[in-house]
Amino acid sequence: MLRFGYTHDDLARIATVPMRALAPSAVVTHFDAPDGFRPLMTENDKYGICSFASARNSRRLQEWVKNGTEWVTDTTTIVANFGACAGIPNTDGALTACQGLGMLQVIDWSQKNGFNIGNQTIEVPTVEAINPVDRLGMAHAIAEAGWWGCIGLTQQDVDAIQAAAQGGPMLTGLPVGPVVEGHAIVMSGMDGVRDGDRMTMATWDCFIQATWEWLTARTLAAYWLTWA
């Protein structure tokens, strides 16, 4: 069973995130991650570590897009970072019991401590907010390999996305029922910006396809993540 693990960030902290200013440019309608990129699980089948796992995959995707190479990372170190950020012991029992983290918690912790991946230079990520109803803004972020966000899932969604991760059909339709889980993801592909056009989520160790309508109806927050 795959784990989720996004918990809501403090509303006051969310309000401090600057909005991304997008310069006028041609409409972006297509993007796919380079062939060499594939998301890494980062123990997200055991722990609610999706906020850290998605940040790791974001940095790796940007490395593939810019340089065509892998950004080597160490899962053990990143799991330890998760425990440190959550303020819990780095033990299986404590990590399993942790429900997860907010995405901005990861940013704040990383800006203070650096995103330590064990065997390369420690980096410091920054975020700017993107309006989740601004599809052109979202599309530009995806095309720059910068889209990092969180989705709210009903129980029906949870079942559907777990099935999609095992090779099930594209996710479609509007949500039905209350949100029961949150999940942090990276967007790694798109075709168009209409309701029925394809979006590709990079999460766990797979790619999951959904329509724009499905994604935007469930996006709780969207960020443009930059690494330095």
Image (cartoon, helix red, strand yellow):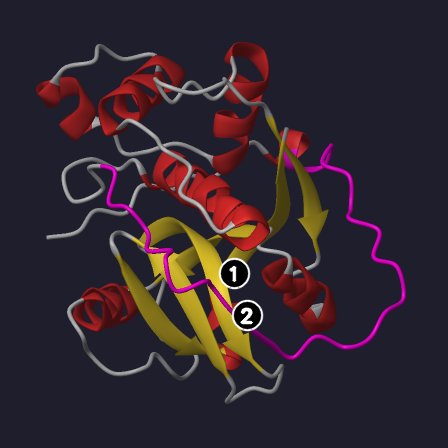
Determine contact: label 2, label 1, CB under 8 Å: yes
Q: Is residue 104 above or below residue 27?
A: above
Residue holding disc 1? 219
Whether residue 151 sits left or right of residue 10 in the image: it is left
* Amino acid under disc 2: Thr
Magenta segment's dominant SS is: loop
The CA span between labels 2 and 1 is: 5 Å
Residue at left offset 32%, top offset 33%: 100
Residue 55 within the segment the image draws in magenta: no
Residue at left offset 42%, top offset 57%: 152
Residue at left offset 72%, top offset 36%: 17
Residue holding disc 2? 216
Q: Is residue 179 visible?
A: no
Q: Residue furthest right?
A: 24
Residue at left offset 35%, top offset 13%: 84
Residue 87 x %, y %: 34, 12
Q: Is residue 113 visible?
A: yes
Residue 25 within the segment the image draws in magenta: yes
SS at badge 2: helix
Which is more toward the observer, 163 or 119?
119
> Which image quadrant is residue 12 in?
top right
Q: Which residues are magenta?
A: 14-42
* Amino acid under disc 1: Thr
Q: Is residue 167 above or below residue 1?
A: below
Q: Residues within 10 Å of mark 1 (few under 14, many from 20)?
A: some
Which is more toward the observer, 196 or 167?
167
